[in-house]
Amino acid sequence: MSQANLKRLISPKTIAVFGSRGADCAIRETRKMGFKGEIWSVHPHREVLEGLDCYKSVQDLPGVPDAAFVAVNADAAIEIVSHLSAIGAGGAVMYASGFGEVGETGDDRTQQLIKAAGDMPIVGPNCYGFINNLDNVALWPDLHGCRAVDKGVAIITQSGNIGLNMTMQSIGLDIAYMFTLGNQVDTDIANVMGAMLDDSRVTSIGLHIEGIRDIKAFDVVARRALKQKIPIVAIKSGRTAASAKIALSHTSSLTGEDQLFDVYFERVGIARVDTVPEFLETLKLLSIIGPLDHNGVASMSCSGGEAGMMADLIEGLDICFPSLESSHKATIQSTLNDYVEVSNPLDYHTFVWGNREQTTACFSAMMRGDFAATMLLLDWPKTDEVNQWEWDTTMLALAGAMKVTANKGIVLSSIPDCMPQRIIDQCLQLNIAPMIGLDTCLKALHHAYRCAQAFAKESLAPIQVLNNDSNRLLNEVVLNEFNGKKKLAESGLKTPAGYSVTSMFGSIEAAEKLGYPVTAKVLSEDISHKSECNGVRLNIVDKELLAHAAGELLEIAPTLLIETM
């Protein structure tokens, strides 16, 4: 597959559309977006489609299209692809289903399609196609909620419906590209990621993954994104057997061992999320304020209940609410009255509510602390739109404090109903991140901090890949447990702290460094199952027990592993 042709397909100057149902929508939506190039409609029997005169076949086209949208049945689609490839077209979106997802007959069609395409990129089959909101292209068979943008996130999914639903978001996320890839018989996630990394207008990449076809190619672009400091957020289906079965029947995707993806994503700095709201909100946060340079954040609200909830929700995340120094507390206190107990999270009460000058002073004092980002919890009432000015005033006070302190600011509403669209739009103009959902926002901040940590890593070596012929690692070397765990730790997997020792005294010295209780095991490349040779001692609580255990184990092997329990 030609990456140069993929770029032609994604940002075309000329488009050919085949079929009627679905094809009509692609013409309509691309025109609606303001596409400036030529669109050619192709149908063997119709005279006109969406006001365009129809050409009868590929051979009748007035030129070679950069992109084609093929909305005909599977067998006819293969023939069209063959003709497009022969004339040097840039690429094609295959809307048709009936390929790998339907079994043996579909597998045969898939092989025919691959042969017909040759070097020409195919998106799909069994997909909705893509929307390019930067260059005003919608090779897409349905309605969507996208709009033209100057920059934004690229979202890549295998599911047309999930992609469609995500375009309908109104949370303030600028979507630059929406790709739905279906069966990925030719163009896969890695190919599209590579094209997105070539586009400086893409601020971050979101992935909804059912399966990765070529992990080696994916690793190349994932490490490239890390080097270019482009954040990646991913939802990976297939945590359960039921989900994996659905993915296989839906897009013929093998989802893979889920825990391996967890370890791999952590290694290459991909933020794995569990829900669509967390996915979209994290992408939005990263696009507006970027990765966090440290993990200390602040929260401000006029409610003690909200402050307490925030303190609970941050538990278990890699971000924190740092305590305030006494001098910082005094500065904040001077902007409020004595009834307010100053802390982080801050409940500033309502004594300054509606007074923009006093509220700005309070927020500025709080934000002079060393925080990576500051959240202002604010829920607008729906029932009294006339009197929303007090909430607006509070939001503008945050904007004023951001100017004074050069701190990153977030307006956070607890539910979508409590953040009006006009406020989302105004926040974006003021470079404030409009976030929705207390726990979702905190998780997004957690991912933003972890993202910055990943960017600070040295260059990663390529992953080792299984040899398909022998199902063994290339250049395989058998490691003992201690060295094996060191390798796993280097790849991001958490392992127990431990030492390799060769004597009873070495065992005791190691345990004193680690702290009791410890475990002791024989350590050898030749012993895979230690329990079968009585080579493991657990929950050793003092040096007398350890000395006895080490003496017994050293009779089995000359080297021991002493680890924390």
Image (spheres, grey):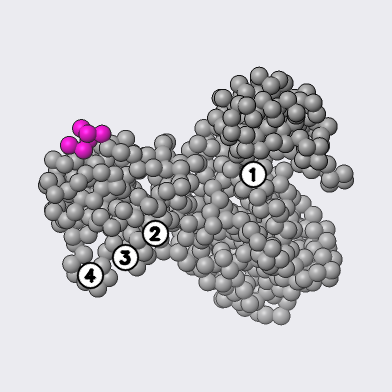
State whether residue 437 appears in this view. Answer: yes
Mark 4 or 3, closer to the camera: 3
Mark 3 or 1, closer to the camera: 1
Please name whichever residue, 81 or 292, is drawn nearer the observer in this view of the structure: 292
Mark 1 or 4, closer to the camera: 1
Instruction: Give the image location of residue 303, x and y in percent.
Output: 24, 56
Q: Which residue is mark 3?
A: 418
Q: Which residue is mark 1?
A: 264
Q: Which image quarter: residue 418?
A: bottom left
- The numbered mark at residue 385 is 4
Provide the residue span drawn in magenta: 325-330
Q: Secondary structure at mark 1?
A: helix
Instruction: Give the image location of residue 296, x and y in percent.
Output: 37, 39
The residue lying at 50 percent from left, 36 percent from top is: 453
- Which numbered disc, 4 or 3, marks the residue that appears first in the sequence? 4
- Name which residue type carries label 2: Gly
Q: Secondary structure at mark 4?
A: helix
- Name which residue type carries label 3: Cys
Q: Which image quarter: residue 71?
A: bottom right
- The numbered mark at residue 437 is 2
Q: CA distance from mark 3 to mark 1?
A: 38 Å
Q: CA distance from mark 4 to mark 3?
A: 11 Å
Instruction: Give the image location of residue 36, x and y in percent.
Output: 52, 59
Instruction: Give the image location of residue 109, x and y in percent.
Output: 82, 67
499 sits to left or right of 367: right
Q: CA distance from mark 3 to mark 2?
A: 10 Å
Q: Is residue 371 magenta?
A: no
- Which numbered disc, 1 or 2, marks the residue that appears first in the sequence? 1
Task: Assess whether mark 4 and mark 1 are in contact (beta carbons under 8 angstroms).
Answer: no
